Amino acid sequence: MLDRLLSFLRGDEAPVAPASDLAFAAAVLLLEAASMDDHIDQAERDRVQAILVRHFGLDVDAARRLIEVAGQRQAESAQLLRYTRTVKDRMNEAERLRMVEWLWEVIYADGREHDLEANLMRRIAGLIYVEDADSGAARKRVRRRLGLDSGPGGRTE
């Protein structure tokens, strides 16, 4: 599956299967969330990899290669609409909410939420048709799961 995705991205092959396309879109969005504070640290990269392995059935090597290619695509373009549209069209409501939780997991991988990350989450949630209240509830669930205590406004800086 990943080899077909990589071939497509290089222009060698016809469009990839929907599952591959969805994994790629998710990887780009997760890396975008990880990079909002101007760098992707190892904890964020590890979190993205774990999500891809756990939820898309990739092995570790395939997830690493997907992250590499998705990272190149994410760095080349600030255009998220293509990837959010894939998520919106290929995931049901519960899966889109799970995607929001994955994004919050990546954001909190470094233990902090930056204003740019919160802004990105509002944009992505709207584009994939997840209500603000549902995104906020997902944020709280992730913070609890990660053992982060809420300071003023729920943010740590």
Image (cartoon, rainbow, N blue to C red):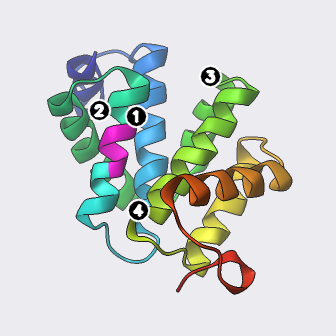
Is there CB contact under 8 Å for labels 1 and 4? no
Q: Is residue 84 above or below residue 37?
A: above
* Residue 9 forms part of the magenta stretch: no
Residue located beneath label 3 in the image: 90
Find residue 55 and report its horizontal and vertical position in percent.
44, 27
Residue beneath disc 4: 109
Residue 52 versus residue 105: which sits nearer the camera?
105
* Residue 33 appearing in the image: no
Q: Which residue is mark 2?
A: 9
How far apart marks 4 and 2 lie (CA) works out to 28 Å
How many residues crowd mark 3 within 10 Å: few (<14), some (14–19), many (20+)? some
* Badge 3 element: helix
How far apart marks 1 and 4 lie (CA) works out to: 20 Å
Is label 4 in a helix, a strand or a loop?
Answer: helix
Residue visible at 49% across and 63% down? 107
Q: Secondary structure at mark 1?
A: helix
How much space separates mark 2 and mark 1, taking CA atoms? 10 Å
Quadrant into which the N terminus falls: top left
Query: CA separation, marks 3 and 4?
Result: 26 Å
* Residue 149 marker: none
Q: Disc 2 or 1, which lies upstream in sequence?
A: 2
CB contact under 8 Å: marks 2 and 1: yes
- Mark 1 sits on what residue? 24
Q: Amino acid at mark 3?
A: Arg
* Marked residue nearer the N-terminal end (3 or 4): 3
Q: Amino acid at mark 1?
A: Phe
